Image: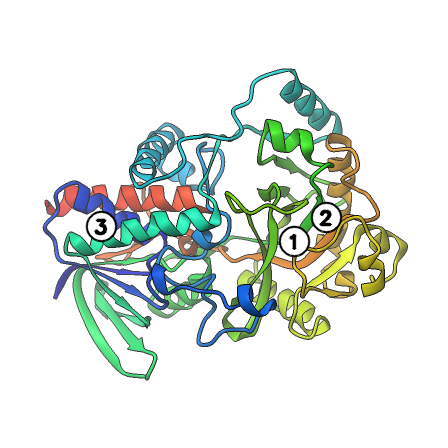
Amino acid sequence: MYDLVIVGAGPAGIFTALEMIRKGSKQKILIVEKGRPVEKRHCPKAEVGHCVNCKPYCHITTGFSGAGAFSDGKLSLSYEVGGELPTLIGENHAQELIDYTDKIYLEFGADPHVEGIYDGEEIKDIRKRAIGAGLKLVDCPIRHLGTEKAQDLYHAIQIYLADHGVEMIFGSECVNIILEGDVCKGVKIQDQKGGQQEILAKRTVIATGRRGADWLERICAEHGIAHNPGTVDIGVRVEVRNEIMEKVNKVLYESKLIGYPKPFKNKVRTFCQNPGGFVSQENYDNDLAVVNGHSFKEKKSSNTNLAILCSHNFTHPFNQPIEYAQKVGELTNMLGAGHIMVQRYGDILDGKRTWPKELSQSNVRPTLVDAVAGDITAAMPYRAMTNIIEFIRMLDQVVPGFASDETLLYSPELKFYSNRVRMDEDLVTNVKGLHCLGDSSGWTRGLMMASVMGVLMGQKIIEWDGI
């Protein structure tokens, strides 16, 4: 019997436990994680040069610290970035929690340098160009952990939690929750050999991250946990030479631009910009390969990559946005024989596929070396592809040369956080004793806001139950 069981050792789950310990809590806490501890997370691609589709799960997306910490490790320090949590708890409270959580990251070794706070004529010129292009530039300071440094930081947090009595079970996944009437009494977990056990707890926190979004959606449907289908993002990872992004990288580090391209006017945005970074592959359940980006503190490439994501909001009668995005990814994987596909922007406009020989002759060389040259438009929905093409044209007015024929587009880039669990400002759901946090809850997007939601959850539990 535990006071609290946390499912998922991503930022939301970690910071729930961390905040409780920091506040002096003596409660009995258990974290259940499907993957491995930080020190045992390892992607073999560094040695073999290509994705080997690790089983039973991808080490980049699964394990202590979750998927975000093993990508680029960026902390967005503005409430305007990172999801819809500020609409639930208030913008001022969200910003206060970001500032508070940022100090915790600094205590555990985060780089004190903050990117994106440059103030001068160059930022005014970028903003002027954005306005002229019909785009909104969102100011957001960034604390960049770096992929390799983030692993050290989260390892320190893992050790801190263990030293302060937090129990952690790795290599086991939650298969269901335990309900008695409308009260959650704990969870059922299963290890990799198929053995199951019940974990009873006074409170249960589900924080399974983007990887667990579809699982949580099924749990919500099965047990009547109030939720709404929300937004799903379908897009591409774009890669250009550093010279093209030189001014933006210097002034903003990460340009967060939002637009509503004609004719469909879906929300399209840039996300996760990696100066001198590397395009990467992540594998989800059912062998779904998706593209992402890494940015290291020390190791640098000649390219900058960033995501361009098109938001889709579905209405009645359709209520399976996650499955829709997965089908798009599966179709792209099929065309790429299980690999990420890459295509030059100019070839898309010319209505032709990209060939390996053409890539080898281009100024922009793919940093994802095992990406398959082909035709991403054969799998991408027309609406999404049209929005992305028009957005790139708009972005070219802000960053001249961005819409070059040689600009690379990788597919699929998918973000699974569409299921939004209904809760109040205290993070209380309609099931007593059950709380849902982080990206899988549909309220956050990214490391900082998920961490903030965990901090708030920890504070609330102590407020309700004492230390």
Q: Which residue is mark 3?
A: 160
Q: Which residue is mark 1?
A: 235
N-terminal-most mark, 3 or 2 = 3
Tell me the CA gap for discs 3 and 2: 44 Å
Q: How many marks?
A: 3
Q: Name the side, left or right, on which 399 lies relative to 120.
A: right
Neighbour tally class for label 1: few under 14, some 14-19, many 20 plus, Cα within 10 Å: many
Residue 39 appears in view: yes
SS for dot 1? strand
**Mark 2 belongs to which amino acid?**
Ile
Where does the image place residue 52, in percent across and percent down from the top left?
Answer: 56, 73
Tell me the CA gap for discs 2 and 1: 7 Å
Of residues 155 and 324, the one nearer the viewer is: 155
Residue at image coords 81%, 49%: 406
User: CB under 8 Å between callouts 3 and 2?
Assistant: no
Q: Residue furthest top?
A: 121
Residue at image coords 35%, 61%: 39
N-terminal-most mark, 2 or 1 = 1
Quarter of the figure with the C terminus: top left
Where does the image place residue 210, in percent across and percent down from the top left?
Answer: 46, 58
Q: Nearer the viewer, mark 3 or mark 2?
A: 3
Which circle marks residue 388 in the picture?
Answer: 2
**Mark 3 belongs to which amino acid?**
Tyr
Of residues 301 and 311, the one nearer the viewer is: 301
SS for dot 2? helix
Where does the image place residue 447, in percent across and percent down from the top left?
Answer: 42, 46
**Mark 1 belongs to which amino acid?**
Gly
Where does the image place residue 312, in percent across and percent down from the top left?
Answer: 61, 52
User: CB under 8 Å between callouts 2 and 1?
Assistant: yes
Which circle marks residue 219 in the picture?
Answer: none
